[in-house]
Each structure stands twice: as structure tokens, then as C-alpha cells.
Amino acid sequence: MKTFRIATRQSALALWQTEHVAARLRAAHPGLIVELVPMTTRGDRIIDRPLSEIGGKGLFLKELEVAMLAGEADAAVHSLKDVPMNLDGPFVLAAILERADPFDAFVSERYTDIDALPPGAKVGTSSLRRQSQMRARRPDLQLVDLRGNVNTRLAKLAAGEYDAIILACAGLERLGLSSHIRHRLEAPGWLPAVAQGAIAIECREGDVQTIELLSVLDHAPTRTCVEAERAMNRRLHGSCTVPIAAYATLDGKILSLEGLVGSAETGECIRASEVGRASDPEGLGRLVAAELMVKGAGDLLGLSN
């Protein structure tokens, strides 16, 4: 294989992530020509409604997967938090890169952190996960939907449409915008989205040559952690239509996982945490999901035990 084509969304962040993958591939495989295939997805085109209303984060993948099936691209690069728990069709995640900062960022022109916001302040985020944790912490705030790419969201904040917004630290750092981070919202007090901060490379199942080529970029510790988080989310039938958060950490052969299910309407948050073997991230994820269900998460999710 002399030329390798990577499908990508056209946002600045998506292009940065794909260029990062391309540079890593060129370094790992001297002589390989890597080309980007920029595309616009339905999730990018519809920005006036929350993702939960238009089909979920999987809308950021479909066009890229169609391009792979049509032979127009060999792989696609995604933010792993946008990848559904179960991939449709003949696809696999051939590589998961080392995770960047997994946490959320409090961003504001005037205020230093959540506690500094005045009563009734407007906070922009369309994430139900963020809304539920924000409402649990500050039920007096106005939570307002916010869609668009990172620069669009920052421009709306600068224009005074919001008193603060919540973004992912990793996205800001990758775009050279980390100066906008006023406060990092860290675990255990605030949990991130499942697999937040990790970049995944998707390709066709059975494409042995591509899978082998991409395997050099796979970061085993990150894969272990995100597999536990995704297993929990899968057991809870999670998507962007329900507020679910998770964060796993690895210490040698010991894997720890914290999970949360919340309500964006009431701010009720149910938490569970467990420790397990690094060799069985799937089992740990299911265990934490089961504990969340026992504590009442099923009621918030509309599920039964």
C-alpha cells in the first residue's frame, strides 16, 4: 500500500485530529503517502437542534462509513466519544490513540468557575450529561442549548450570548485554545463523556492490510480504559439522548471505573464505582452498570433491571 486515504469531517478539530493521525502514520511507515478525504456529515449540517433530537452522535459517522464501503477511503478518524457503542456494518476500531485530557472545561469571559456564576446566569451546552451535572451543582442557572464547532461556540460566548459555556479540554488544547480554560472540571466531582479525549481510527472489518498498518498507533492502556467505559454505556443502552458519564483509570493491572447516570431536568445523579482486573474491562463495565441499575438508574433511563 503506497497511498492511504483517511475520511474525516471538515471541522477544524476533526482536521487537526486526522492530520495528527496522518503524521503518526507517515512516521511509522516511511514512504507511505497519506491523503485526507474531507467530508461533511449530517451531524455537521444540522446545528439548530440538539443531537438527541436528530439521531445522536452516530450522525457524525455515516457519510465516512459510506465512503469506506465505496472504496473512496481506507479508514476514518473520529473522536471516540462520538462513536456509537455498537458499530453498524462491517467496521472495526483498528486503533485507539493515547488519550488526551479527558475532562471538561469551564469557559467564561468574566467568571472563574461554576461557583462564581451569579444566580440565573446562562450556561451554554447541548450535552445532557453536562446539563445533569450542572443542574445538580447549580440548580439556579439557566442551561441553554449550544451547537456548532469550537470556534463558533467561543464566538457566541464572546458576543455575550452566554455567561459561560462547557467544552472539552482536549478539543481546546488541540486547537491551541487552552488559554480559554478557566477551570478544569475533574473527576470524581465531575465525570466526562465516555471515551472523551481519545481518538479512534475506524476501518473495514477484514481489511487485514489496513488493520495491520494502523495497529502501530494503538495505545493499549487507553483501549483498556475506554473499553470499560464503553461496556458500561453499552449495558445501559447509552447514547446522547441520555445523560451518562464514565471515567476509568489504570494502575498496573488494576482498573478502576466511575460511572454516573443523571437527569438533565432534575439534576438527580446516580453514581457507582468499582475496581477490577485490567484484563477484563468488559466485565468491570458491566458490573458498574449493574450497580447503577440497582441504585435506580433504570428509572432515569427508562429501562428495567
Image (spheres, grey):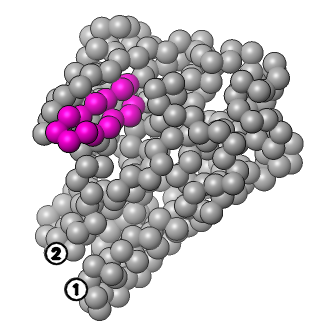
Label annotation for residue 83:
none
Q: Which residue is mark 2?
A: 209
What quarter of the picture does the N terminus occupy? Answer: bottom left
- Reply yes or no: does residue 294 show up in magenta: no
Q: Secondary structure at mark 2?
A: helix
**Which of 165/114 is in front?**
114
Q: Are marks 2 and 1 in contact (CB under 8 Å)?
A: yes
Residue 9 vertical placement versus 247 (above, below): below
Give the x, y percent position of residue 34: 37, 82
**Which of 193/181 is in front?**
181
Give the x, y percent position of residue 213: 21, 74
Q: CA distance from mark 2 to mark 1?
A: 8 Å
Q: Secondary structure at mark 1?
A: loop
Please tell me in which quadrant of the rendered image residue 160 appears.
top right
The range drawn in magenta is: 246-259
Label annotation for residue 1:
1
Task: Please state which amino acid type lies under the numbered disc 1.
Answer: Met
User: Residue at the spot x=28%, y=30% of the render?
Assistant: 256
Please tell me in which quadrant of the rendered image residue 51 appears.
top right
| Position of residue 114 in the picture relative to residue 302 (left or right) | right
Give the x, y percent position of residue 219: 27, 57
The dominant secondary structure in magenta is strand
Residue 45 vertical placement versus 270 (above, below): below
Please tell me in which quadrant of the rendered image residue 238 appears.
top left
